Image: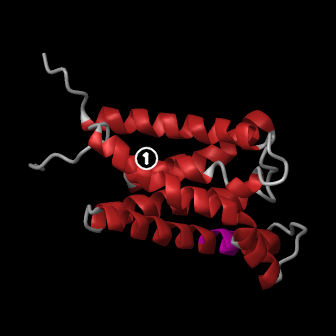
Amino acid sequence: MNSRISSRTLRLVWAAVCLALALVLPFLTGQIPEIGSKLCPMHLPVLLCGFLCGPVWGMIVGFVAPLLRTLLFSMPPFPQVAVPMVFELLAYGGVAGLCYNLLPKKKFFLWVDLVIAMIAGRIVGVLAKLVCVGLLGMKGNIAVAALFTSYVTDTIPGIIVQIILIPLIVIALKRAGLVPVEPKDKK
């Protein structure tokens, strides 16, 4: 009997762990009123899922996490925050996984992959917010300066945490042999 866990099973487990973290982390950071939401607690596990499980699982977790959290806990508010967040997190998970698969597997490229994913996610988030404001008639300020502030300036603490923690976690899990690997011989 083979005692190794299959790569497919390991991806499923990591995706479930990342989804659970996306549901729970906002409770922990919410205890810090000054910067709790600025830490972007749902972004961290979705980005991590993209790195650990690939673009498909990253996108699935990114899509499901805000909707499930809204259903279970009424946060983030639906549709004004949850809908744009769905597309933002979907982009984070997908782009992180895609870049990680395409670019070299050197430590430096973890940060490159991460920055690309963070930029792409924020662009998608801003575009989704603009579409939601226009199509759904949601109330909200759509001035470019306000969107820039809400998606970049207000989230600087989260950006810093992500840039520090995600590569370190991926490196540690890789060294421990806990990251799913693609089989060398695809048929």
| Magenta portion: prevailing SS class | helix
User: Mark 1 falls on what kind of element?
Assistant: helix
Give the residue number, with chain letter if any, for mark 1. 169
Image position of 76 with respect to 130: above or below: above
Is residue 12 in view from this perspective? yes
Q: Residue at x 26, y 38 (%)?
A: 177
Q: Nearer the viewer, residue 29 or 78?
A: 29
- The quadrant of the image that shows the N terminus is top left
130 is within the stretch colored magenta: no
Task: Characterize the local packing of mark 1: few (<14), some (14-19) or many (20 or more) Cα atoms within 10 angstroms.
Answer: few
Q: List x then y, in percent, for residue 118.
A: 54, 67
Q: Residue at x 74, y 58 (%)?
A: 38
Image position of 92 with respect to 2: above or below: below
The stretch of residues the image draws in magenta is: 124-128
Say what amino acid the circle numbered 1 marks. Answer: Ile
Is 103 on the left-hand or right-hand side of 39?
left
Q: List x then y, in percent, for residue 182.
A: 21, 48
Image position of 52 with respect to 106: above or below: above
Image position of 109 with respect to 42: above or below: below
Q: Residue at x 14, y 21 (%)?
A: 2
Q: Residue at x 61, y 75 (%)?
A: 123
Q: List x then y, in percent, for residue 174.
A: 30, 45
Is 90 on the left-hand or right-hand side of 116?
right
Is residue 87 in view from this perspective? no
